[in-house]
Image (cartoon, rainbow, N blue to C red):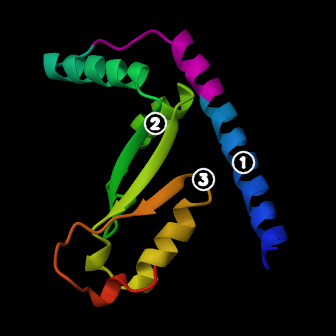
Amino acid sequence: SLPFKEQLLDHIKETKKLEAERRLALLQNAQNLENKPEKPIAKAQDHSFTKQFSHVLSKADVILEVLDVRDPLGSRCLNAENQILAAGKKLILILNKIDLVPGDVCRKWLAYFRKWYTVMPFKANTQEKSANFVNI
């Protein structure tokens, strides 16, 4: 038996509850947006990107969003996240460059994002050892 099984199960239940509430709010928001008239798209590039993003979103089951751990809130795209979750797709966050921040900072960001998403740390550095990567 796992020593923290009850805590783990409680955490999973709470995470699922939070995710369900967020998805419901996103679906309601998406329905409200559908009722509003669309704004004309200013640039052809914006339209092209939106079309490609919609195509990828319709074909994918899981979407990976790569965040820079040095500024994960600044590297997020909340609009894309909302569209992904409103479409009922699974979103996985990748915290990149974890070797560039102290391990404590990385652990805190992982704990923060794991309240809502599946999060994976990633180190692209190919050197043998990094002091910041130990025990994350």
Q: Secondary structure at mark 2?
A: strand
| Mark 2 lies on residue | 62
Q: Amino acid at mark 1?
A: Lys
Q: Amino acid at mark 3?
A: Trp
Residue drawn at the location 55% of the way across and 28% of the way down: 86
Q: Which mark, residue 116?
A: 3
**Mark-to-mark CA distance, 1 and 3:** 8 Å
Q: Is residue 58 above or below residue 85?
A: above
Residue 117 placement, left or right of 126:
right
User: Which class describes the residues within 10 Å of circle 1: few (<14), some (14-19), or many (20+)?
Assistant: some
Residue drawn at the location 55% of the way across and 52% of the way down: 117
Q: Is residue 108 above or below residue 103?
A: above
- Please state which of the two labelled residues, at mark 2 or mark 1, is closer to the viewer: 2
- Please state which of the two labelled residues, at mark 2 or mark 3, is closer to the viewer: 2
Q: Position of residue 52 (x, y in %)?
A: 26, 21
Residue 111 appears in the rendering: yes
Residue 108 placement, left or right of 29:
left
Q: Position of residue 131 (x, y in %)?
A: 30, 90
- CB within 8 Å, label 2 to label 3: no
Question: Mark 2 or mark 1, which has the lower sequence index?
Answer: 1
Residue drawn at the location 47% of the way across and 70% of the way down: 109
| Mark 1 lies on residue | 16
Q: Position of residue 105 (x, y in %)?
A: 42, 80
Q: Bounds of the magenta span?
A: 27-40
Question: Mark 1 or mark 3, which has the lower sequence index?
Answer: 1
**Mark-to-mark CA distance, 2 and 3:** 15 Å
